[in-house]
Amino acid sequence: MLMSRVALRRASTVTALAAAAVLAAAGVASAHVTVHPDSYAKGATDGLLTFRVPNEEDSASTTKVQVFLPTDHPVLGVLVHPRDGWTAKVTTTKLEKPVKTDDGTIDEAVSAITWTGGRIGAGQYEDFDVAFGQLPDDADELTFKTLQTYSDGKVVRWIEQGGEEESENPAPVLKLTAGEGETPAASAAKDGGTRSSTQAAASGDSNDSTARGLGSAGLIVGVLGLAAAAFAIVRGRGRSTRS
């Protein structure tokens, strides 16, 4: 009887630890700085990008966010949406290769946006909106390296490439689709429906988040199933011993 109780306690402990590990992994995966939507059509015009910055620290607040825009494939016509409590500083850079547009030749573009003055507390996030006039049509993706500074002086460099699965601190990446009909976002952007494009891409983000949530839930259900099996085995042994 004593051995049965010990085995049951061990099974319960293993189950609790496994469930905690699953939940922790899900939390880490969602704590990266990301850009939304995560895809647009090449050459899309008059759209919106949202940089979502979560706070990962329990004892410090995020006080500064700096997003770097690529200049080898520049984003044209950048405008920053005001964010309550934050001050945005826009840095422009002379382009090595000017871009020809219907409105003329562009020889400089925004290379960095720095937000200061606000605070993102523990367990919170902030969305920073940036409108653009035109995306490049000669790239497959755009990488937005980001620096996140905390109130205790810590700086997290979201600059690594390779995606969330391959990097600890991945940079936000915007995929640029090749043609019309490839994705809802691409099709809408090609038709000039920027609002529809944003909504379609946001729907894709929601589906992806739902899939991840279901995956984590499945793992947890599996862990609980193992716990139930362990309990049944221990209970069976106890009955056998008494018999």
Image (cartoon, rainbow, N blue to C red):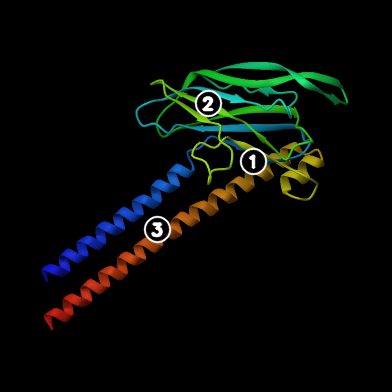
Q: Earlier in the sequence, mark 1 or mark 2?
A: 1
Residue shown at 41%/34% (left/top)?
123
Give whichever of 194, 169 is nearer the camera.
169
Measure how far apart labels 3 and 2 are at the Cα level: 34 Å
- Specify the quadrant of the image occupied by residue 141: top right
Kindly identify which residue carries mark 1.
Answer: 38
Measure how far apart labels 1 and 3 are at the Cα level: 28 Å
Q: Residue 39: where, in percent of width, then height? A: 68, 41
Q: Residue 61: where, in percent of width, then height? A: 41, 25
Residue 29, compared with residue 89, is above or below; it is below
Q: Residue 34: where, in percent of width, then height? A: 57, 36
Residue shown at 81%/38% (left/top)?
192
Q: Secondary structure at mark 3?
A: helix
Which amino acid, mark 2? Leu
Residue shown at 22%/61% (left/top)?
10
Kindly identify which residue carries mark 3.
Answer: 220
Which amino acid, mark 1? Asp
* Quadrant location of the N terminus in the rendered image: bottom left
User: Image check: 114 left or right of 236?
Assistant: right
Q: Residues within 10 Å of mark 2 (few under 14, many from 20)?
A: some
Kindly identify which residue carries mark 2.
Answer: 147
Which amino acid, mark 3? Ile
Labelled pair 1, 3 in contact (Cβ < 8 Å): no
Q: Earlier in the sequence, mark 1 or mark 3?
A: 1
Residue 232, compared with residue 22, is above or below; it is below
Q: Residues within 10 Å of mark 3 (few under 14, many from 20)?
A: some
* Quadrant location of the C terminus in the rendered image: bottom left
Residue shown at 58%/42% (left/top)?
162
Q: Secondary structure at mark 1?
A: loop
Residue at the far bottom: name it: 243
Q: Residue 229: where, in percent of width, then height? A: 31, 70
**Which label belongs to residue 193?**
none
